[in-house]
Amino acid sequence: MRLENKVALITGAASGMGASMARIFAREGAKVVVADVLEEEGRGVAAEITQANGAAIFRRLDVSNEMEWKAAVDATLAEFKQLDILVNDAGLSGSAVEDLFDTAAWDRLMAVNARGVFLGMKFAIPIMKAAGGGAIVNISSISGITGQHHVHVGYNASKGAVRTLTKAAAVQHGRDNIRINSVHPGLMPPMRSSGRTADPSIRTEMLKQVPMGRAGRVEEVANAVLFLASDEASYITGAELWIDGGYLAT
């Protein structure tokens, strides 16, 4: 198994891509901490994994809260004694119909999407460094690469921050054997927290620009994250992986 004897903490793991990652990681032998603000759904994902003979616990985590991050990492170490993999998947998006200069929307998006990733690395990296290494995968977006008119500018800015934060941290911690990469999904199934792709007209418009002619599947992102988190990607760090059906190549 590709993640045997590894412990992974995955944020945003109660639904969507994060839940898919949690299931796939567990099937590949990892012990998984399912972290999310959605308690009922998160406990359900953890229970599903344990019922399938995997190892998982749920931990409520608001990624914008520094003390909750500390508690989540402490709980991971208390339960599993180590932390080898961190996947920062939790995120929010904002509809373009919001006021471009709505400070509350900006602050909300930056708090979860950028600050949340920063805090996750702040608490995970010292643990990984002491253990001799680890792997971190930060979920950004194609909106972190190029401007998108159908999302709030705070979403673009926060996901761009994830991209460059990933590269800076990868450079600074390469000698610590900590690999840090970013993943940039394109058009995906609409999520309850997303105002960007739930509108059918926007999805139709975006699909016309995807060379493969379809939206991505959460499992396709999860499998890419699995690769980056595994030892198979042992010489990959500071990279950005686009999973967008060719959208950014056009």
Image (spheres, grey):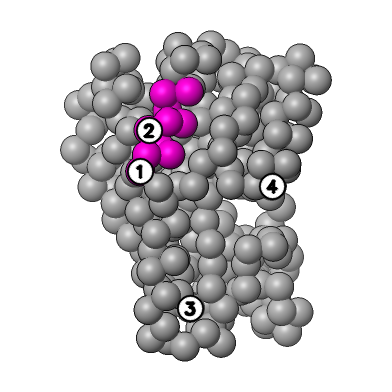
In magenta, the rendered stretch is: 66-75
Where disc 1 sits, the SS reads helix
Residue 173: which quarter of the image? top left
Q: Which mark is residue 70?
A: 2
Query: Main SS type for the magenta part?
Result: helix
Kindly identify which residue carries mark 3.
Answer: 152
Residue 50 lies in the magenta stretch: no
Q: Earlier in the sequence, mark 4 or mark 1?
A: 4
**Callout 4: 10 Å neighbours few (<14), some, many (20+)?**
some
Q: Earlier in the sequence, mark 3 or mark 1?
A: 1
Per the image, label 4 sits on a secondary structure element best described as loop
x%, y% of residue 222? 62, 41
Which residue was labeled with disc 4? 15
Q: Is residue 79 above or below residue 156?
A: above
Mark earlier in primary sequence (4, 2): 4
The quadrant holding residue 234 is top left
Q: Earlier in the sequence, mark 4 or mark 3?
A: 4
